[in-house]
Image (tube, grey):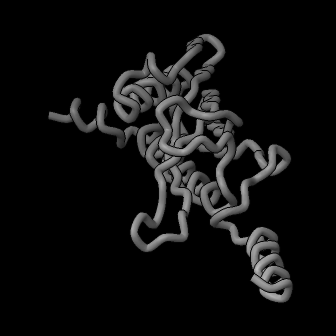
């Protein structure tokens, strides 16, 4: 191989490595911010909001004990952990992406007539994840944020008395 071909190959490799494609660029720890959702639920006690959230987490996650680490009715607080999936693009048509997982913290507080949910990504490799990335890519983080929004929407329904447990009670 002549020197010109080697130089051209070097430029191409450097150019590919320097791209800022969100499918391949890992986020930094500074980009991780807690995402907070506030809910106004008129005429609902702190106890009812707490119980609805606890029941919701139990039905959504299958077993609330696997998610909830701390729950205190008096303070209206639920603290827990979850695992969320995102896709890592491979750039190949044969296997277009690899399924990846990341951990996140769940923080919930109920007060009279209102509640707050906070979800925050946690850096680290999730055991059993197909990829070994400790943080998602930029596009993976956007997927996670979309999933966080869906979690919030389903929790809001439960807080308003429209969750799976409440629908079971209406017979």
Residue 39, horizontal then vertical, whole percent: 60, 44
Q: Residue at x 72, y 61 (%)?
A: 25
The single residue placed furthest to the left in the displayed view is 171
Where residue 8 appears, as percent x and y from the top left, is: 80, 85
Residue at coordinates 46% horizontally, 24% vertically from top-left? 54
Q: Is residue 121 left or right of residue 165?
A: right
Q: Is residue 118 left or right of residue 143?
A: right
Q: Is residue 78 above or below residue 8?
A: above
Residue drawn at (64%, 27%), measured in percent from left and top? 109
- In the picture, which quadrant includes the N terminus? bottom right
Left or right of residue 48, residue 102 in this image: right
Residue nearer the viewer, 69 or 129: 129
Quadrant in which the C terminus appears: top left
**Relative to 8, residue 73 above or below:** above
In the depicted view, which residue is nearer to us: 10 or 135?
A: 10
Instruction: Answer with left or right where residue 157 lies relative to residue 106.
Output: left
- Residue 144: horizontal and vertical position, in percent? 58, 52
- Vertical relation: 87 (above or below) 22: above
- Residue closer to the observer: 98 or 171: 98
Please tell me which residue is depicted at 61% across the width and 54% down the height of the picture. 145
> Which residue extends farthest bottom?
4
Q: Quadrant of residue 122?
A: top right
Q: Quadrant of residue 2?
A: bottom right
| Tally of numbered discs | 0
User: Measured from the top left, where is residue 3 in percent x and y?
Assistant: 85, 84
């Amino acid at each position: 191989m002549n020197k010109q071909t080697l130089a051209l190959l070097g430029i191409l490799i450097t150019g590919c490595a320097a791209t800022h494609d969100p499918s391949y660029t890992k986020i930094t720890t500074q980009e991780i911010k807690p995402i907070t959702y506030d809910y106004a639920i008129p005429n609902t006690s702190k106890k009812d909001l707490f119980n609805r959230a606890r029941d919701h987490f139990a039905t959504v996650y299958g077993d609330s004990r696997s998610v909830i680490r701390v729950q205190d009715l008096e303070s209206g607080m639920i603290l827990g952990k979850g695992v969320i999936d995102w896709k890592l693009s491979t750039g190949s048509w044969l296997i277009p992406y690899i399924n990846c997982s990341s951990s996140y913290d769940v923080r919930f507080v109920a007060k009279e007539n209102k509640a707050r949910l906070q979800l925050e990504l946690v850096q680290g490799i999730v055991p059993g994840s197909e990829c070994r990335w400790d943080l998602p890519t930029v596009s993976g983080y956007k997927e996670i944020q979309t999933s966080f929004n869906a979690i919030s929407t389903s929790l809001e329904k439960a807080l308003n008395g429209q969750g799976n447990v409440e629908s079971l009670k209406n017979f």
